[in-house]
Amino acid sequence: MPTRILSIGTAVPSARLEQPKTRDFFASQPGVGRLTARLIGAAFDQSAIDTRYSVIGEIGSGGTLFSDDGELLRVPSTGERNAVYRREAPPLYAAAARDALERAGFDASEVTHVVTASCTGFFAPGPDYLLVKQLGIPPTAERTHIGFMGCAAAFPALRTATAISDARPGAVVLVVCAELCSLHIRSSSDPEQIVASAVFGDGAGAAIVSSAEPRGGRAALRVDGFSTAITSEGERDMDWTIGDSGFEMRLTAEVPRIIGREIAAVVENMLSGADPHADVDAWAVHPGGRSVLDRVQSGVGLPDEAMAHSRAVLRDFGNMSSATILFILQRILADDAFAEGARVAGLCFGPGLTVETARLTLGRGAV
């Protein structure tokens, strides 16, 4: 039997950040001059984001980690930020996992393998271990954690789960990607940091991957294949490292342009020369930002409706790094406009520049 994604679950923190209010908070920080304030305004207003979610509920409203009084932004150490990750990430992992299990009609006791991914915090024993303990997954479940692969990590995680399922008939693999990007925000006049503060949010996505039949006639995504590409340039334009005051992202203005120049060739290879218009029914494109989606759309020549779910997730949640693509695939699964046998193409972008792709087929029942 083919391996399928039997369900996708999602979770976000309770604190909702409205983009205009968050923009004004950053623009009001001490030392922000007129030029920086204009850059902040442009980055936030042109982001195509309405709301994001964060474990740091005190941004602009009082608190302890980033803001003592709701007015001034502190600069916590990496250790302070990671301590919040250790406290706040496990409930998010668990919530997304429970959602995926419920949607698939599976019990945690049936899980044989756990694959987790994250690039925004670390601790051990980690989230993979805690999922086993907290959800009642058998202690014999084999665990794998994929760390620091950035926004593209969901597809390597699903690829790992697929390899397990293909090799071990009967395996039930729980995949969870959780990111607390807001832990690494900072007040800065650097345009790259301003963009990061304007687009990144927190969230978790989970999937049940198995060759088992979908239960109760549920929709599922058959896994047809994955591929990886490294662009000819971009290694110095998108990277992610650990600094003394949080994790530090480099995200230059060249990133969308590089994607725009090279995406057509990547898609041609992914589809083995098939027509991206006639032979793909649904697109799931990681919304690294509005300009990334714009460049993919123009580079591949896609109509507006092909980008609708990707743009909607960006609007409602921002860029949640590796978790984001699972939010998009969840919407495609739930969209009755896509019939049995609809062909799905997925694109994710990570440091390097690396492009991870997936080919899937939608089934309304068994596929």
Image (cartoon, rainbow, N blue to C red):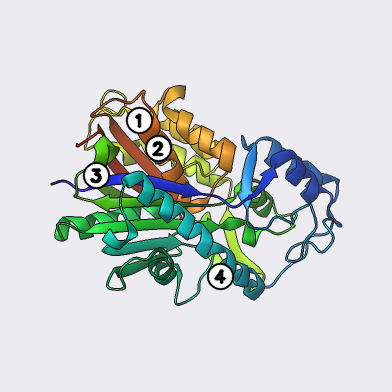
Residue 73 lies, in percent from the top left, at 78, 60
**Badge 4 or badge 1: first in the primary sequence:** 4
SS for callout 4: helix
Task: Identify the mark at residue 86; answer none if there is no mark.
Answer: 4
Q: Amino acid at mark 2?
A: Ala
Disc 4 or disc 3, which is closer to the eye?
A: 4
For marks 3 and 1, give the CA distance.
14 Å
Q: Around disc 2, counting alpha carbons within 10 Å, would you say few (fewer than 14), some (14 to 19), or many (20 or more)?
A: many
Disc 4 or disc 1, which is closer to the eye?
A: 4
Disc 2 or disc 4, which is closer to the eye?
A: 4
**Badge 4 or badge 3: first in the primary sequence:** 4
Tag 1 near tag 2, CB within 8 Å: yes
Kindly identify the residue that appears in the image at 82 percent across and 64 percent down: 68
Name the residue tied to disc 1. Answer: 282
Name the residue tied to disc 2. Answer: 284
Up-down: is 59 above or below 257?
below
Q: Amino acid at mark 1?
A: Ala
SS for callout 2: strand
How many dots with numbers?
A: 4
Q: Around disc 4, counting alpha carbons within 10 Å, would you say few (fewer than 14), some (14 to 19), or many (20 or more)?
A: some
